[in-house]
Image (cartoon, helix red, strand yellow):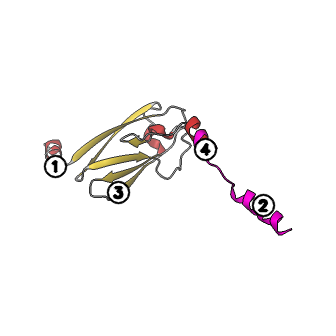
Amino acid sequence: MEDKKLLNAGYNYYALNFKSVGGLVMPVILEFTFADGTSDVVRIPAEIWAKNHDEITKVFFYKKEVVQVVLDPFLETADTDRSNNYWPSRPQPSRFDLYKARSRRSGENGMQRAKRAKEMKK
């Protein structure tokens, strides 16, 4: 009976699946952003992996509608693949894209400008 009351209480339910790809046990840190612009950070201790070391599912419920979820928003864990840390997903530039963007920049960096200025004073 209590479960029915909870289901009919007008909450929005979100079931999130997590996989431990590297096998390293870490806490799960989530930032939920709501339609009204507010956010909520949820920190789940590493003990959540005690029952299943490979995959877990956690259900969250809020009165507000969630528009974005970010896993490890403050870069506190040793996550090597951040491309799958966003819902809805965000396009991540590849290493090649980053290299192309860096090589397209022309001009000097700060150290080069300082060296050139020092040489001009001589």
Q: Position of residue 99 (x, y in %)?
A: 61, 40
Q: Residue furthest right?
A: 122
| 35 displayed left or right of 87 | left
- Image point (58%, 35%), residue name: 96
- Residue 64 in the image: state x and y as whole percent: 24, 53
- Between 58 and 93, the one lying in front of the other is 93
| Left or right: 12 in relation to 27 | left
Q: CA distance from mark 2 to mark 3?
A: 47 Å
* CA–CA distance in space, label 3 to label 1: 19 Å
Query: Would residue 65 be found to the left or right of residue 52 on screen?
Result: left
Q: Secondary structure at mark 1?
A: loop
User: Which residue is located at x 48 percent, y 45 percent?
Assistant: 27
Residue positioned 62% across, 48% down in the render? 105
Q: Which-is-in-front pick, marks 2 and 3?
A: 2
Q: Callout 1, which amino acid?
A: Gly
Q: Mark 2 vs mark 3: which is more N-terminal? A: 3
Magenta segment's dominant SS is helix
Q: Quadrant of the C terminus?
A: bottom right
**Residue highlighted by disc 1:** 10
Mark drawn on residue 116:
2
Identified by mark 2, the residue type is: Arg
**Disc 1 vs disc 2: which is toward the camera?**
2
Between discs 4 and 1, the one toward the N terminus: 1
Residues rendered magenta in the picture:
100-122
Q: Amino acid at mark 3?
A: Ser
Mark 1 / mark 2, whichever is N-terminal: 1
- Tell me the number on the disc at residue 104: 4
Residue occupied by mark 3? 39
Q: Earlier in the sequence, mark 3 or mark 4?
A: 3
